[in-house]
């Protein structure tokens, strides 16, 4: 099964700042695996786009998302509407010697296509995969899905065929004639962290946060 | 000048989990002011949505974005294409007693509408406002914009008229019959931080990172 490389189709070729485009699938996978939330778009009948944040998980050469059967976004995507799923990780602020060259460090992946509905018999496995990805270690403690929960959930898959990846991780790229300006330039990194777990107020047992939470990293 | 409250127009009413909808403009402003990157959508002629990350700044009752005159997204938006600008801040992972109730803490704002082009004579001021927002303190050190930089930049404004805000910040909301399960439940917070500034390798002067960077917080 062959999947085109990022940026290799007419609609995904990176035209703006092409030097920031990554063209290998490993880079695509790495960006998708580093994120927790994707922004997913759908176009309504009158041609207007909507963008909503959704949790997601990569499963090999596809991305899985799940949502309520009552969600207009998920119902539209389940019906095969064209979509764009974008994941962006913000890594820093680039402080250049001009406002014009100041920018951000980021990693961003875009996936174009249309979703397919994960069939009933595969839904529980797909949801478990999403749980494993977003809450690693948790699944062994959880009860099985209930039929009414599965019935209330749409699980959709989007294949990683039309994709692009852009990574901005360079120092400021100032014009030559700005380099003699005696002001500081550089990058202020942005990092994300998991904090101390906060127990639910309705916890009925004296249970410490489980060890696997300590393995979660951002 | 009156602007409708978040969620008060037919297209912005929050239907899924309406208890998470915030309906005051202060909440809208707070979410927009807390983010650095928005996901902005445009629909192409064949009805397919594209979503791209852009830096932005709130300016009163509008959001300003800027991009290259060579960007298809910005050219399309400048031509008046309908858009959706969504800002999402991820605040934590909600670890419930079931996979079904597990979710995220987040703050999300959505702005619908069409952009207007900030006219030439107001462009420098608008760009300065974006700089002040994303790099507070920096502007006093920067040289003025050059005419060719202004000419290469589109600055667009999107009015905060059709908006919605959703805030998820509650503990796990498990089913009653799950509360006797002797497993931990709670929230793992996610926080973002600015790290130690990294000087540009081509810095020609022995200049320490400026003090105003220390005031930047996430």
Image (cartoon, coloured by chain):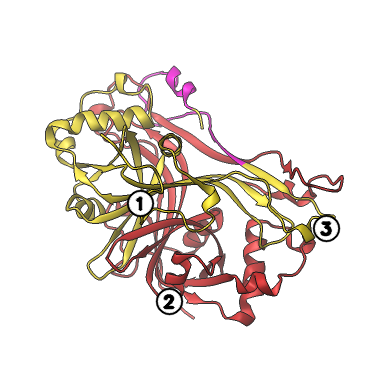
Chain colours: A red, B yellow
Please name the residue that numbered disc 1 is placed on: B9
Front in this rendered view, residue B177 or B30: B177
Please name the residue that numbered disc 3 is placed on: B181
Q: In which chain is the residue bearing label 2?
A: A
Graded by Cα atoms within 10 Å as few (under 14), some (14 to 19) or many (20 or more), the crowding at tag 3 reads some
Place of residue A146 in the rendered image (x, y in percent of width and height, measured from the top left):
71, 71
Region rendered in magenta: B190-216
For residue A2, say whether it is visible.
yes
Distance from the alpha carbon under mark 1 to that under mark 3: 42 Å
Is residue B201 magenta-colored?
Answer: yes
Distance from the alpha carbon under mark 1 to that under mark 2: 26 Å
Q: Residue at x 57, y 81 (%)?
A: A119
Place of residue B101 in the rendered image (x, y in percent of width and height, measured from the top left):
66, 58
Q: Is residue B134 above or below residue A125?
A: above
Residue found at the very far right of the displayed protein? A206
Place of residue B184 in the rendered image (x, y in percent of width and height, measured from the top left):
79, 50
Front in this rendered view, residue A91 or B8: B8
Q: Residue at x 45, y 42 (%)?
A: B23
Q: Quadrant of the N terminus of chain B?
A: top left
Graded by Cα atoms within 10 Å as few (under 14), some (14 to 19) or many (20 or more), the crowding at tag 1 reads some
Under tag 3, what secondary structure? Answer: loop
Under tag 1, what secondary structure? Answer: loop
Under tag 2, what secondary structure? Answer: loop
Front in this rendered view, residue B36 or A205: A205
Distance from the alpha carbon under mark 2 to that under mark 3: 37 Å
Please name the residue that numbered disc 2 is placed on: A79
Q: Quadrant of residue A6?
A: bottom left
Is residue B108 magenta-colored?
Answer: no
Q: How many marks?
A: 3
Q: Quadrant of residue A183?
A: top left
Q: Residue at x 65, y 69 (%)?
A: A149
Among numbered discs 1 and 3, the one appearing first in the sequence: 1
């Amino acid at each position: 099964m062959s999947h085109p490389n990022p940026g290799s189709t007419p609609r995904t070729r990176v035209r703006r700042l092409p030097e920031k485009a990554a063209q290998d699938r490993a880079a695509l996978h790495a960006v998708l695996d580093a994120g927790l939330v994707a922004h997913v778009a759908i176009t309504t009948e009158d041609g207007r786009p909507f963008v909503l944040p959704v949790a997601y998980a990569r499963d090999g050469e596809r991305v899985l998302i799940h949502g309520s059967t009552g969600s207009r976004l998920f119902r539209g995507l389940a019906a095969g509407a064209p979509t764009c799923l974008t994941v962006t990780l913000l890594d820093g602020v680039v402080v250049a010697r001009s406002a014009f060259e100041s920018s951000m460090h980021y990693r961003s992946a875009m996936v174009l296509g249309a979703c397919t509905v994960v069939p009933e018999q595969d839904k529980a496995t797909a949801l478990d995969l999403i749980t494993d990805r977003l809450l690693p270690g948790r699944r062994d403690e959880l009860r099985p899905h209930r039929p009414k929960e599965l019935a209330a959930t749409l699980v959709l898959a989007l294949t990683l065929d039309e994709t692009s990846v852009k990574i901005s991780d360079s120092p400021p790229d100032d014009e030559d004639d700005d380099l003699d300006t005696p002001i500081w330039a550089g990058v202020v990194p942005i990092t994300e962290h998991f904090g101390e777990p906060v127990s639910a107020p309705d916890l009925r047992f004296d249970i410490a946060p489980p060890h696997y939470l300590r393995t979660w990293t951002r």
